[in-house]
Amino acid sequence: MREEHDALDNNDQHMEHETNAAEHAAHENHDAGIHLHEHQHDGITHKHVHYHPAPHEPQEPETVHGHTHTYAFELYAYADSILHRLDARTKMIAFIVFILAIVMTPMASTWRFGLFLTFIIVLYRLSRVPFIKFGLKRSLVVEPVVIIATLFLAFMPNKPHPAAYDLGFTTLAISNGGFYIFVNAIIKSWLSVLVAILLYSTTPFPKFIKGLELMRMPQILTMLFSFLYRFMWVLTDEIKRMMRARDARAFGGGRLWHVHIIGQMVGSLFIRSYERAERIYAAMAARGYDGTIKSFDTPALTVRDAAFSLFFFTALFAILIWRF
């Protein structure tokens, strides 16, 4: 009974989606083709691509209205806020300087990192990107890797003199210098990851690449980033197809046999990826690709960027020179 109830619920949801899709295509006057559609999610305006077929195309329910969402890490990249409207170069320069300020701040001034965190939360509020549901959750995914990489710092020999954390209202002495360095790495890396998440959450990847080009970054780097962005999901689908084919052949055996099969899959994936890259580059070169990102609108620095830069660097400078 429960399975039948779940099936009926799924069927009702599917029919409701098809009905909404048909109403959307019937009531909204869109030309055939691709356009950006806006919708609300958690109070944030998102954009994703919608497709409407031409009148002569078959009007099946599943083809009347099609759409594709952005990648998971770009969930908020196409939202609308003060930070989203800024030029990519403005955000990259500001956030890189922010990360450098975090890394170069002495760990003894622990209270200053509290101000850094407060400033980061203010920036998240301005961008309308959820700090806890999005930024904090994704930063905690990265932290275990950092902890494993820096864990041995806690076992370093003690410093000649005890280290101390200045909390503003009191001072906490630490006799183990290795543990002091370990905590230093954890806090600074966590704050830096929060800033990096905010950058990619407010900057669509094509605009990010275009900003790198305008900042005169080496072309080989922008090309690699661009191809990685476009084809990492293609390779993911390729891996899933290979795994389904493996399982369809009654994949079994011991662990050594598993390692042998996985090794063959990795080798096959490498060869397929290499051949695919050669075909794609040849096709793009035949269409006039010269290594640069083509865009309809040329980004330009505006008064908005200047105002944000003034606010950002003034606040950052105030945090750095503040004394209790």
Image (tube, helix red, strand yellow):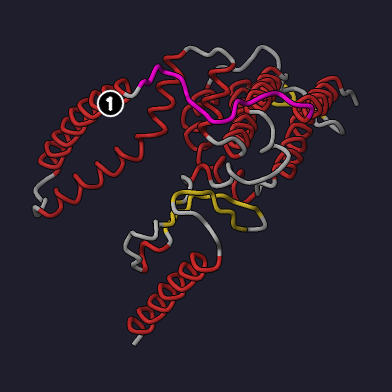
Residue 306 location, quadrant: top right
Q: Position of residue 258 (x, y in %)?
A: 14, 42
Q: Which residue is mark 1?
A: 283
Span of residues in magenta: 288-303
Q: Classify the position of the C terminus by image quarter.
A: top right
Residue 109 location, quadrant: top right
**Magenta-colored segment: predominant secondary structure:** loop
Q: Position of residue 190 (x, y in %)?
A: 61, 33
Does residue 258 lie above or below 244 as drawn? above
Q: Position of residue 257 (x, y in %)?
A: 10, 41
Q: Position of residue 231 (x, y in %)?
A: 35, 34
Dot 1 amino acid type: Ala
Q: Is residue 143 left or right of residue 273?
A: right
Classify mark 1: helix, strand or loop: helix
* Residue 65 visible in the current orientation: yes
Residue, far front: 56
Q: Classify the position of the N terminus by image quarter.
A: bottom left
